[in-house]
Amino acid sequence: MTQVYFHCSNSREVRIDRSGEAVSDLAEARDRAACIVRSMIMGRDAEDWRDWVVHVSDDLDDEIFVLPFAFVLGKLH
């Protein structure tokens, strides 16, 4: 198990994950990042989430990967 952190940001704001979560592998970290994206976009506000990203980092604050919200949202029609 590895402790990872899911920081979210766009060009104007950064939301820091101070508690993190223990995951067993990269697939679990990716799935958790996608869940975070879905929970944020389902909120009550009318935020345009397309320019947001999740920065997944380890306990040394080294970035493991980035998941753009647009990847989860899909393409606009």
Image: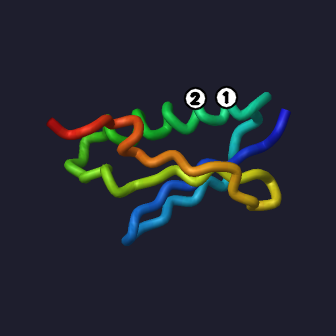
Tell me where residue 31 sits by quadrant: top right
Q: Which residue is mark 1?
A: 27
Q: Is residue 61 above or below residue 76?
A: below
Q: Would you say 48 lies left or right of 60 here?
A: left
Residue in the picture at 78% in, 43% down: 3
Q: Is residue 52 visible?
A: yes
Quadrant showing the N terminus? top right
Image position, residue 37 (x, y; %): 44, 40
Q: Nearer the viewer, residue 65 or 9?
A: 65
Q: Is residue 35 above or below residue 76?
A: above
Q: Would you say 59 lies left or right of 49 here?
A: right
Q: Which mark is residue 74?
A: none
Quadrant showing the C terminus? top left
The amino acid type of the residue labelled 1 equals: Ala
Q: Is residue 23 above or below residue 6?
A: above
Q: CA distance from mark 1 to mark 2?
A: 6 Å
Q: Residue furthest bottom?
A: 12
Q: Would you say 24 lies left or right of 32 here?
A: right
The amino acid type of the residue labelled 2 equals: Asp
Do residues under tags 1 and 2 come within 8 Å of each other at their CB atoms? yes
Q: Would you say 69 lies left or right of 43 here?
A: right
Residue in the picture at 71% in, 34% down: 26
Q: Is residue 19 visible?
A: no
Q: Which residue is mark 2?
A: 31
Q: Secondary structure at mark 2?
A: helix
Q: Secondary structure at mark 1?
A: helix
Residue in the picture at 48% in, 65% down: 14
Within-10-Å neighbours for mark 1: few <14, some 14–19, many 20+:
few
Tell me where residue 4 sits by quadrant: top right
Residue in the picture at 40% in, 34% down: 38
Tell me where residue 73 sits by quadrant: top left
